[in-house]
């Protein structure tokens, strides 16, 4: 457990049997799906609203009427997947000690959740939502070489990036908060947000939509492009960073 938290916490969620899934409509990310042609291994999870993921995973996240976790991949790799359940937190970690990068292969995960409040993904991870994922308040933390394609709908969304995370997000939220040190990339023109709060440092970039209010703090060579013609705009730029409206 300690090695997970020393790494950085990671939360995951992905979907399972279609009979357990709540279909919330079509998404431009619907082509990302969990392939059932391979043998699937089901793991017990218990109740949780927080998920931490550490490892080389491809994750498919969706809502359902029960919590359930499915894994697919090479049996030798599946045997290395450690699942821990501590109170309200589910921790999924891929142990890669004494294994070469050449012999290692990616593990696919499909996790269905009834409710998700926090998700952290660390290492080399791809995270997808094949359909709209709904929530009230959600915090997502990403560290490492993480690639994200998400369709999200809720009230409050907080995104914390570290490393070379690339995120493409669509949907609807009332409030979006983003912290991005490093060289992350966020494409969220299609995430219809009322209020957006951005803090960027390093060489990151963010494309966002804000209809009412946009607050931006930029340091270094970061670039923020925005749409939505927000009534209130507050920006603090240091270094050679830029904040600009685009059509």
Image: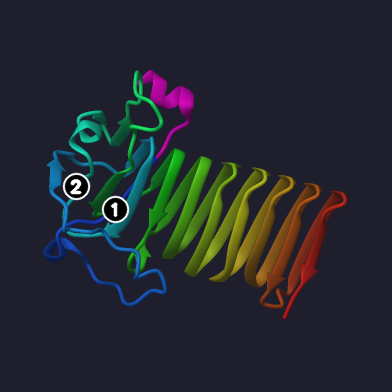
- Which of the pair 126/156 is nearer the observer? 126
Pick the quarter of the image with the N terminus.
top left
Q: Position of residue 119 (x, y in %)?
A: 40, 44
User: With 222 as the anchor, is 64 left or right in this view?
Assistant: left
The residue that disc 1 covers is 14
Q: Which residues are magenta?
A: 1-10
Point out the residue furthest to the right here: 239
Point out the residue furthest to the front here: 102
Pick the quarter of the image with the C terminus.
bottom right
Prevailing secondary structure of the magenta residues: helix
Label pair 2/1, CB-CB below 8 angstroms: yes
Element at badge 2? strand
**Is 112 covered by the magenta stretch?**
no
Q: What scheme was used to colour the molecule? A: rainbow
Number of other residues with Cα within 10 Å of mark 1, as a class: few under 14, some 14 to 19, many 20 or more: many
The residue drawn where x is 31% and y is 33% is 91
- Which of the pair 54/234 is nearer the observer? 54
As displayed, is residue 215 above or below residue 145? below
Point out the residue furthest to the bottom here: 247
Q: Position of residue 228 (x, y in %)?
A: 66, 77
The residue drawn where x is 53% and y is 57% is 167
The residue drawn where x is 67% and y is 46% is 183
As displayed, is residue 89 above or below residue 118? above
- In whole angstroms, how far apart are the C-alphas of marks 2 and 1? 8 Å
Q: Position of residue 197 (x, y in %)?
A: 65, 56
Residue 70's disc is 2
Labels in figure, total: 2
């Amino acid at each position: 457990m300690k090695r997970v938290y020393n790494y950085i916490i990671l939360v995951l969620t992905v979907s399972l049997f279609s009979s357990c899934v709540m279909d919330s409509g079509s998404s431009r990310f619907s082509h990302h799906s969990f392939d059932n042609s391979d043998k699937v291994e089901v793991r017990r999870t218990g109740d949780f609203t927080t998920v931490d993921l550490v490892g080389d995973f491809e994750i498919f996240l969706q809502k359902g009427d029960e919590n359930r976790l499915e894994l697919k991949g090479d049996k030798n790799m599946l045997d290395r997947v450690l699942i821990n359940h501590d109170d309200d937190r589910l921790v999924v970690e891929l142990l890669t000690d004494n294994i070469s990068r050449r012999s290692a292969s990616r593990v696919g995960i499909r996790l269905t959740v009834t409710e998700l409040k926090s998700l952290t993904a660390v290492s080399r991870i791809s995270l997808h939502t094949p359909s709209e994922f709904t929530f009230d308040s959600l915090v997502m933390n990403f560290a490492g070489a993480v690639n994200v394609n998400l369709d999200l709908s809720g009230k409050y969304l907080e995104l914390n990036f570290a490393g070379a995370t690339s995120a493409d997000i669509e949907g609807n939220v009332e409030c979006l908060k983003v912290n991005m040190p490093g060289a992350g990339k966020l494409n969220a023109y299609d995430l219809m947000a009322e209020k957006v709060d951005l803090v960027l440092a390093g060489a990151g970039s963010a494309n966002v939509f804000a209809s009412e209010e946009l607050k931006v703090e930029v340091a270094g060579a970061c670039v923020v492009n925005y749409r939505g013609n927000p009534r209130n705009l507050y920006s603090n730029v240091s270094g050679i960073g830029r904040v600009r409206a685009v059509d």
